[in-house]
Image (cartoon, rainbow, N blue to C red):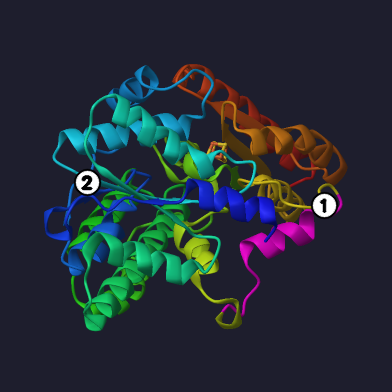
Amino acid sequence: MSRATEEQIKRFSTMDNNIPAKDRVIAWPRMGRIDIPLKALLTNLGAKIVIPPANSNEALEIGVKNSIEGICLPYKLNLANYIMALENGANTLMMFQAPGSCRLGNYTKMAQKTLKKKGYEFDMVIFDMYRNKMIQTLHAFWHVTRCLNPWKYFKAFSLGFTKFYAIDCAEKMLLYYRPREINKGDAEKYYNKWLTKIDDCNSLIGSKFLCHKIRKDFKNIQIDKNKKVPVIFLIGEFFVLLDPYTNQQIEKELGDMGFEVRRQIMFSGWLEHVLKPSIFYKKESHRERAVKYASKYMKRAIGGECIETIGDTVYAAKNGIDGVIHIMPFSCMPEIVSQNILSKVSREEDIPVLSLVLDEQTGKAGYITRIEAFIDLVKRKKLRRGE
Ligand code: SF4
């Protein structure tokens, strides 16, 4: 790691220690359903928690009102999550940070300053997930809970990780079954049922069978097995990919239009790659695949998911995927770079690509119209190929 990156990490890492562990009420930003595994993890370490409400128009309004103009959408929503959590009794805010040109590395610090100026009293715990990852993570959880019981750590982390995998498993099933289901809404019902079951599970043994049970249960959904379902890769910035409110439910929209979405970033896959020591990580990671496929167009990662965006598009083209939708927040620097390269990739690799930029001004109607126009393009291309 370069000296500049190390200094950047040191500058932005914070572990305030003003509140005694027994009085701590912990909160973290919302993003999709990461609240379920984090709840399991922290409560099993004996922590009290507050889960801020899911992202919504109300949260966005709070975030926009308290942010500087031009900052990326994830920052605004994270800030709103912090405010809502503090208003609901939280006094400790947790967040991880990363180096690079993505502003994630410093925006928690910015949020901390903004919240202090607004008069909130709280501890901020920002931990680094890109250097001694597992040790830093364990240290952060020890710092907020002061739990010294190894069994509790084993249970909390095992349960937390298994729940991350189970949620991703349910999401993959939903994405596969939604465009094929015969009774509209079945897949969504199964998905919601499983989210509740995953949340309720507090047994280590029970949690190990969740993915198996989810896959088996989804098979009960009646589907049209002969339906030809085009496949779309959904790629782009991490936060907008994983948060359905922020991406305006794009997966549901595409699924309802009869397309199978394959989202290229799943939280469990990312977490496994980031936290697992490399000697235990045997398979090719998403990042490694991206670097390999992007090499013709981009020589190195410059932060955020920039290189994944390029690599995933080339990979899609070489693997018969019908089209790629790239989503990014307005003013996201790494994704602006990849967006500019994507038109060349689309032309040279002969794959339809649609880039959608999201911010608080993005209207649903215009967004859907662009997706529908893109879908027509994908269908025409398939017809031309005689499929
Ligand atoms: S990747 Fe882009 S949108 Fe995401 S936090 Fe970084 S700068 Fe903001």
| Structural crowding at the residue carrying mark 1, measured as other residues with C-alpha within 10 Å and reported as few (<14), some (14–19) or many (≥20) | few
Specify whether residue 318 is in view: no
- Region of the chain picked out in magenta, as a range: 281-296
Amino acid type shown at disc 2? Ile
User: Residue 293 appears in which quarter of the rendering?
Assistant: bottom right
Q: Position of residue 149 (x, y in %)?
A: 21, 80
Secondary structure, mark 1, is loop
Residue at 70% in and 63% down: 289
Residue at 17% in and 63% down: 200
Q: Position of residue 130 (x, y in %)?
A: 55, 60
- For residue 382, which numbered disc appears in the image? none
Specify whether residue 366 is in view: yes
**Residue 100 lies within the magenta run:** no
**Location of ligand 1 given as a quarter of the image:** top right
Nearer the N terminus, badge 2 or badge 1?
2
Is 81 situated left or right of 324 in this image?
left
Q: Position of residue 131 (x, y in %)?
A: 55, 64
- For residue 51, which numbered disc appears in the image? 2
Is residue 61 positioned above or below 301 on the image?
A: above
Residue at 59% in and 24% down: 370
Q: Quadrant of the N terminus?
A: bottom right
- Does mark 1 have its CB less than 8 Å from ligand 1? no
Amino acid type shown at disc 1? Lys
Is residue 2 positioned above or below 368 on the image?
A: below
Is residue 285 positioned above or below 12 on the image?
A: below
- For residue 299, which numbered disc appears in the image? 1
